[in-house]
Amino acid sequence: MEIKIGIQHVAREITVETESTAKDVEANLEKALADGSLLAVTDEKGRKVLVPADKIAYVDLGQEKPRTVGFVAL
């Protein structure tokens, strides 16, 4: 799943491909915002992205299962 995180006063957004579900990411975001801690997201390669919750402008949760493009043999 692709997640886009907008940071306050930064022109570019952070894009992370993760195997986490939208519910997991949303729960982590709510906890980080409530605690004033870091939002931690692990990407598909196992690297961790940490963002201070008080600096997050928005989080865009993409589709969990990407649509296929082109011809697919069933």
Image: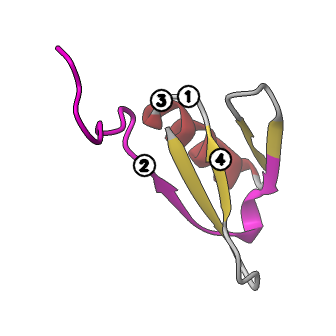
- Nearest to the eye among marks 2 and 3: give it: 2
Q: Secondary structure at mark 4?
A: strand
Local crowd size for mark 3, using a 10 Å CA cut-off: few (<14), some (14–19), many (≥20): some
Q: Indicate the quadrant where residue 55 lies.
A: bottom right
Residue in the picture at 70% in, 47% down: 32
Asked whether the beta carbons under mark 2 and mark 1 sit within 8 Å of each other, the answer is no
List the residue tagged with mark 4: 16
**Upstream in sequence: badge 4 or badge 3:** 4
Report the front residue among 10 and 69. 69
Placement of 18 over or under 14, stated as above or below:
above
Q: Which mark is residue 20?
A: 1
Q: Secondary structure at mark 3?
A: loop
Q: Amino acid at mark 4?
A: Val
The magenta region covers 50-74
Local crowd size for mark 2, using a 10 Å CA cut-off: few (<14), some (14–19), many (≥20): few
Asked whether the beta carbons under mark 3 and mark 1 sit within 8 Å of each other, the answer is yes
Q: Can you say which quadrant of the picture contains the C terminus?
A: top left
